[in-house]
Amino acid sequence: MSAFRHFPTGTRIPDNPHAVIVSLPTFADVVGYEERRPETMDAVRTGYPRFLQHPYVTAVARHLFLASKLPTRALFPVASAEVARRVAALAGAQDWGVVESDGWALLHTSPTDPATAARAGKIIQHTGVAVSSRQAEDWLLARGLPLPALTPIAPFERAATAVVPAATPSAAANADVAAANAERIAAEIVTVLAPLLAPAGAADVLLCRSGMNAFYAAFEAIRALQLPRGRTRWLHLGWLYTDTTEILRKCLGTDESFDFLPDVLDKAAVEKFFADNAGKVAAVVTETPTNPLVRTPDMAWLSALARQHGAVCVADPSISGLVNVNLVPFADVLVTSLTKYAGNGGDVMAGALVVNPAAPDAAALLSAARLARSPAYWRDLARLAEEMTEMTTVAARINENTGRLSAWLGKHPAVRRVLRADDGGASAANYAAIARGAGRPGCMLTIELNIPPARFYDRIRCAKGPSFGTGFTIVSPYIYMAHYELVGDAAQRRYLLDCGIDPELIRVSVGAEDYTEIEAVFAEALA
């Protein structure tokens, strides 16, 4: 069967219990998902793991909840007891507790304080610290418990009774085996990544359970270094991914703050920020290129400016991927999602944090980040190692297809504008300075249409949902999916436009399929 078809609402893509993509094939489905409408959520069995808890993880929480004889509580399975304590503190929880099990932990909060529970859930989403579906799967199987059908998630509080076997010696031994496996496979992955991370070496790389967890670990490491120096100001340069912004918004202390400059090419504004906050800037954070405008700042200039002012330069190359850009020399700390490009099958979550050994305080940053990160589960690392064997080949096909599709879309009368990382004036020159050669734009195209976006979106026959950087093409109405709170209000829509963002834009993650098939489905949808 062709990869280009309509996938029903809620379909896992790929057809795998651990898929990170859920099909939202119509604009109505996207709205229903964002608003959690029953008619949509009844069909959605799994989703992007940081946004929707997997049924296996829900089952683990229920079983441990019942075995621990807890009263009715809001339950959050997270990477460790230390993570649980950190989430509780950031959520401002007063009534909370932790139950540990085989290396992970169950945070529980009062069901009579839904606001705190909601904050805790969001902190877990932003920081990427949840238990993975493979980790939950192993926990259930080690106890002889059945894996739940991949059905819609029910509230934890409705779990009534269940017989929960006690943890067995073999299950405890599995935790030790898991730790040993994780260390071994992580070393293999870092060895494969090493040629893409110079001048960093293997000792400068930390693998995390998601790209957002890598950013969170960097964020806490920088705070540990800079707060004692009285550096409390952060610069948010360019439109950043929603959870990056939310970490800055929710996890900075009361005496810390961040400023947002939307235009990555406005050097005068950046220089003014540093001059106005001399001696106070902790860090500058940027995506390189940005999402969804695929614009690239002058990274050599930015990193030099940050160092001149004692600030840490943090860069995220997730949009184009490590395989296409060489960013470590132009950043003090690099954070990236390995769910994209490296995990090109679309069924694993992982991230990497890299400290440039030439950065000021490199050793201190790395040490603090190691304490703040949540390592990936060993089976997730094993799956990532499998998929990475095709990373270079898949990326090459994606790059070729992106270039061809971009040129074709740019001439189509239904398309008003096409944005691409290596095409766009000064930004293109900046991208060329970090690219690993010509013809490496990465997977992302952003298109603005002369026809109703909903009509195009509903018609196109391909995967439609969150994520990018997979071997198959994915389309999404990005602002609706990532910043839904901004599209329904006239003032917020004007704000988006002032930032250069069309609320109705369509983000395309070009895949590695046969190009003629890709062009055909776009031609059909744009007709």
Image: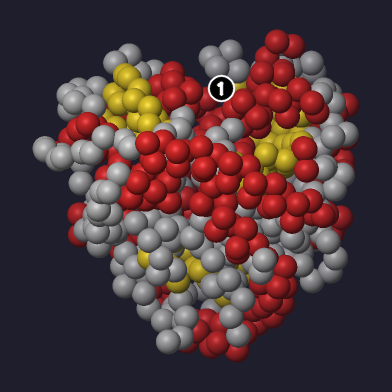
- Residue drawn where x is 47% and y is 64% of the image: 476
Residue 113 in percent (x, y) is at 24, 22
Quarter in which the N terminus is drawn: bottom left
Residue 202 in percent (x, y) is at 78, 43
- Residue drawn where x is 61% and y is 37% of the image: 215
Foreground pick, 320 / 139 = 139
Residue 412 in percent (x, y) is at 60, 82
* Three-letter amino acid code of the residue under disc 1: Leu
On the rendered structure, is 119 left or right of 354? left
Residue 20 appears in the picture as rendered: yes
On the rendered structure, is 158 left or right of 193? left
Foreground pick, 198 / 383 = 383
Q: Please, which residue is most extreme toward the front here?
A: 169
Residue 311 appears in the picture as rendered: no
Vertically, is 283 above or below 34?
above
- Residue drawn where x is 71% and y is 25% of the image: 367
**In this figure, which residue is indicated by the disc labeled 1?**
252
Foreground pick, 472 / 445 = 472
On the rendered structure, is 497 left or right of 54? right
Vertically, is 67 above or below 477?
above
Badge 1 density bin: few <14, some 14–19, many ≥20, Cα 10 Å:
some
- Quarter residue 459 falls in: bottom left
Q: Which element carries disc 1, helix, strand or loop?
A: loop
- Residue drawn where x is 30% and y is 44% of the image: 143
